[in-house]
Image (cartoon, grey):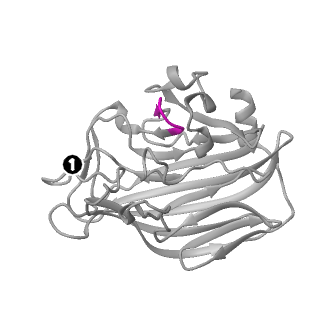
Amino acid sequence: MKSILFFLASAGLAFSADITAEKTSTVIHFAIEGKTICDYQMEPGEVPEGVDAVFAHGAHLHPIYSPSGKLVTGNHPEDHRWHRGIWMAWTKTEFGDSHPDFWNMGKAGEKLAAEVRFVKLGKTWGGAEGAGFVSEHVFLNHSHAPNEKVLNETWEVTVARKTLSGTITNIIDLTSTQTCAGEKPLKLPKYHYGGLGVRGNLAWNPVDAVTMLTSEGHDRVKGDSTKGKWVHIGGEVDGTPTGIAVLIHPSNFRFPQPLRLNPKNPQLCVAPSQDGDWSIDPGKPYISKYRILVFDG
């Protein structure tokens, strides 16, 4: 599996059809030949019926589909209403004398204590070579006063489709650049999750309906709290096996990066804080890069 995924990431034949990027008021919709590849949710989207509006969220990728049109991500699951496709957030933090939690955004009946909010769209593009966007987010702390800025974040995302080692694959490249919004650092104590989050299809919620695999050959149980160069999550969708492989760039902090493979639901996290205390400091951008491969089989 290691050599297969390395080859998938390294070589491929691009499709000649254009990938389109259609912008609405809240979403950028990426598609090829009429089939959705993924959506980037800018402003908070609608919540499911009966779900508290506090859980409305943006600044994430969902839905994401395989080349055959199988949904691979989940959003607003019953067990964690704040899980949202693919996103970036920190959990255990110290910011001055407060501890904003940007991951667990929202508790029913309460106001948000912290959040990651979409700010603006820089540009979008589409074409035969691929599509993408550049956008800005802000990490906000509401502990003492509304809208205290903690981090500014830029997302650079490209979307492509290629045939890799005979497998049609949707490819999403995500680069996140986070910088301190002021003179205070964001301290990140040791914790078992927080970073890049991935929530799988809700059809994978039963424990035996999802599989996970790391670059070191570990499954869901043995791979939790280990390090990896890549991690895969998948299962059957409408009777067809499909899934996502997240490839971690070698330049990322603490590469190979620590992994959280959730034992109770189809969710994983690339979690650098597992390795101990660290911080994002003023004047020192924190840059992380991930390649997301989505394929059937």
The quarter of the displayed image where residue 102 is located: bottom left
From this view, report whether residue 268 is shown above or below residue 289. above
Q: Amino acid at mark 1?
A: Glu
In reply to whether residue 265 is colored magenta, the answer given is yes
Instruction: Give the residue at x 59% y 61%.
Output: 157
Residue ID at (47%, 29%):
263
Q: Which residues are magenta?
A: 259-267
Outermost residue toward the front in this view = 50
Residue shown at 50% from the left, 38% from the top: 268
For the point 85% across and 65% down, the residue is 17
Does the stretch in magenta take in 294?
A: no
| 5 sits to left or right of 185 | right
- Which part of the image, by quadrant, shows the C terminus? top right
- Residue 45 position, x and y percent, is 50, 68
- Residue situated in front as seen by the camera: 212 or 185: 212
Q: Secondary structure at mark 1?
A: loop
Near mark 1 (Cα within 10 A), the count class, few <14, some 14-19 or many ≥20, is some
Q: Quadrant of residue 137?
A: bottom left
Quadrant position of residue 109: bottom left
Q: Is residue 206 left or right of residue 13?
A: left
Q: Position of residue 140 (x, y in %)?
A: 29, 64
Taking the image as shown, residue 26 lies to the left or right of residue 125, namely left
Residue that label 1 marks: 94
Q: Is residue 209 left or right of residue 45?
A: right
* Image: 17 above or below 260: below
